[in-house]
Image (tube, helix red, strand yellow):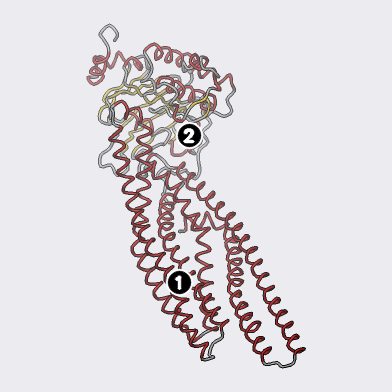
Amino acid sequence: MKYIYRHIKKYFPLVLLSIVFLALQALCNLMMPNLMSDIVNVGIQDYAMEIANTADSAAKELLKDQQMQYIVSMGGKMLLLALATVAVDLAIHLVNAISGTGMAKDLRRAVFAKIESFSSQEYSEFSTASLITRTTNDVQQVQMLFTMGLRMIFYSPIMGIGAVFMAIEKAPSMTWINVLTVVIAAVLMIAMFILLSSKFKILQTIVDKINMTARESLTGILVVRAFSKQEYEQEKFDSVNREYAKTNLFINRVMSVMMPTLTLLQNIVPVIIIIVGAQQIAQSTMQVGDMMAFIQYSATILASFMMISMMFIMLPRASVSIKRIAEVLKKENAIVETENPVPAEFDRCTVEFDNVSFKYPDGEEYALENISFKSNPGEVTAIIGSTGCGKSSLIQLIPRLYEATDGAVKINGINVKDFALKDLRDLIGYVPQKSQLFTGTIQSNLYVGSESATQQDVEKAAKIAQAYDFIMEKEQQFADPVSQGGTNLSGGQRQRMAIARALVKNAPIYIFDDSFSALDFKTDANLRKALSENLTEANIIIVGQRVASIMDADQIIVMDEGRIVGKGTHSQLIENCTEYQEIAYSQLSKEEM
């Protein structure tokens, strides 16, 4: 709870103000039956008896005037109380709206900021669907508890306890009726809590599954259609949906039994009070007004319990949501900032791997072992190897997307852990395997590389990345819209956009993680030529699958099962590296090599 508290504590003054308003509203509502009782007992019954026992007609008229004045006076007080109740209720809703929406905004921002700070290691521990649910639905549950729950937590007990004391004052002889009612209502609520508390945790987990299943199916809709798996995906979604419906139905069935039972109890109690109270009125041990007030106070007690019963629905679900949000907020990042970062203001950078080993969190075996090489500025270093040999894992250690387990990754002789993360990543233009674009325009996507870039910088980057021609063919050119994920562009166009985005950064280090795979050979060749002509001072590291894309590199690193098995130029490796020979011969003819 402490992780939630730090983000909502600034709203506690508003919460206290809301509690004060709730207490005032409860006081006004508790006074109403008492005033009504006085009108009946004094204004009607006592005055009627006094008028009946008075023989003098002038005195009778005076008493009738006094009676009317008393009734009007007490009625006026009731009206003022009613208006005060409305005003206080409006104030409560306003305060709750401000505090509730503000708290939800801050909590959602905190969760999102925390998610943004996650490294790849933390992302692997939470599914994307779960993180989305925690940021939206779970925060909404906490907001409902914060707004509606305040009324139920504070208003209901004040009303219930106050009504108990007022009822005892009006008719102490009938207190047993309220005690019996409270016991029955309490047993019902405890039983409901036991039945439903575990179901709400399951419900939130199922919401995660629904989000994950829907997201997966919609993201892969082209694959689903290509393999005619619509019915399979429909059944998979229906299965999760049925599970959600089944759990919700159980909760609603329990509630459908609970609420009518309490309502029945609420309607039976006045009948019992009238039966018992009528006998006491006949024996002159109780007044009619007191019995009427007792009925209202008894109804208030039951209504308070009904409101509290709603808390037994809201509280378990909100408590589950609080725990799920806290799991994100309290998650410690595997990659932490250094306390005294070294300045990272370099125009030329040397990247060095010094006996680096790495294994994934909870991994038993090393994904990379004893990696040592140096990549110099003005040179192209290529990394090649079979699928799953650790190429991507290797280059992700440079911007600290993962942390090296052993050894050190260095830039200009300084361990990357000694730089501030932002400064380190400002040195790197990174193009990942999957070319992820964002909703907006072509220009807004390219400006992600550098917000301070000029239009000339953007156009130059697009030309180097071989993206300029297809951009200019668009109807709005650089202002042409890009859909979510860049789905309105081809795979090759997305790759070229991602490369141009990195080039806009004008960084001293460029990392291309298998970023040329969707390009045809001509575009690939033109791109590599443009890179060599324009990035003469940059340190370029290319991860590739195609020998043709990396054979001109100044240094080629050959990897196999997480180890370096070859290092040198293309001609050197063709002569002395068996693994490289196998890859090259499978792709190129002898003439091409």
The answer to which quarter of the image holds residue 198 is bottom left
The tag on residue 248 is none
Q: Nearer the viewer, mark 1 or mark 2?
A: 1
Q: Position of residue 285 (x, y in %)?
A: 53, 90
Q: Quadrant of residue 396?
A: top left
Q: Please name whichever residue, 229 or 119, is drawn nearer the observer in this view of the structure.
A: 229
Q: Compare residues 364 and 50 and report the one nearer the observer.
A: 50
**Amino acid type, callout 1:** Asn
Amino acid type assigned to the residue bearing label 2 in the image: Leu
Q: Position of residue 28 (x, y in %)?
A: 61, 71
- Looking at the figure, which quarter contains the C terminus? top left
Q: Nearer the viewer, residue 171 or 505?
A: 171
Q: Residue at x 51, y 75 (%)?
A: 161
In three-dimensional space, the C-alpha distance between marks 1 and 2, rounded to whole angstroms, equals 71 Å
Determine the residue located farthest toward the right in the rendered image.
58
Residue at x-position 32% and y-position 45%: 240
What is the x, y in percent for residue 476? 55, 19
Check the image and report above or below for 87 versus 98: below
Which residue is disc 1 drawn over?
267
Counting from the top left corner in percent of width and height, residue 77 is at 68, 74
Label 1, residues with CA under 10 Å away: few <14, some 14-19, many ≥20: few
Is residue 37 rendered to the left or right of residue 250?
right
Return the residue at label 2: 424
Asked if 364 appears above or below 533 in the picture, the reply is below
Q: Compared to 386, does 284 lie above or below?
A: below
Dot 2 lies on which element? helix
